[in-house]
Amino acid sequence: MQRTQFGEMACSIARTWDVIGEPWSALIVRDIWVGIRRFDQLQADLGISRKVLTERLNHLVEQEVLERRPYGARPRFEYHLTKKGTELLDVLMVMVRWGDHWLAGEAGPPVLYRHHACGQIAQVDSRCSSCGGPMHADDVDVLPGPGAATTVG
């Protein structure tokens, strides 16, 4: 079956989905962020097949989310987040907040996050880059931007 190419759509959500829309991709990025960087370690942690892990790692390297760095005498690689990959974690942190709120249940969140600046356990909260106020779906209007698709007719 041919996969839809979301990256060609004039939509930032679709373009982002094209990079990380396959479920294993976000989990691989998460693992690399917490320090699991070698192929065998990733495979063991995720329980993923070698074939799928290879495909996902290649895709994330092609998309410049990850970079390969050689280690050891044999040609083996560790995977590290690029700047693009590190910024992608902001998207995943918003997913964490939603999952903790709606899916954690009575046990509570499986992981806590301590903010470096203040040392407190905190959650991600979307803020406006101009005024610093809350910025959630009910707080914004969606307007066409300079890269919006135009129709002729």
Image: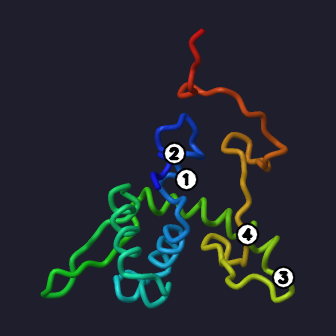
Q: Three-letter amino acid code at disc 1?
A: Trp
Q: What residue is pinned by disc 2? A: 6
Up-down: is 61 above or below 76?
above
Quadrant in the rendering for residue 140 = top right
Query: Circle 3 — which element?
Result: loop
**Lower position in the chain sequence, tag 4 or tag 2:** 2
**How far apart in space, not on screen, are marks 2 and 3 (Cα)?**
33 Å
**How far apart in space, not on screen, are marks 1 and 4 (Cα)?**
23 Å
Q: What residue is pinned by disc 3? A: 105
Q: Are marks 1 and 2 in contact (CB under 8 Å)?
A: yes
**Position in image of residue 131 (x %, y %):** 74, 42
- Seen at 47% across and 52% down, the residue is 3
Towards the viewer: 55 or 103? 55
The reply, left or right, for residue 59 in relation to residue 91 is left
**How far apart in space, not on screen, are marks 1 and 3 (Cα)?**
27 Å
Foreground mark, 2 or 3?
A: 2
- Seen at 40% across and 68% down, the residue is 56
Q: What residue is pinned by disc 1? A: 17
| Color encoding of the figure | rainbow
**Position in image of residue 115 (x %, y %):** 65, 73
Residue at the left extreme of this rendering: 73
**Lower position in the chain sequence, tag 4 or tag 3:** 3
**Position in image of residue 28 (x %, y %):** 47, 74
Q: What residue is pinned by disc 4? A: 123
Query: Circle 4 — which element?
Result: loop
Foreground mark, 1 or 2?
A: 2
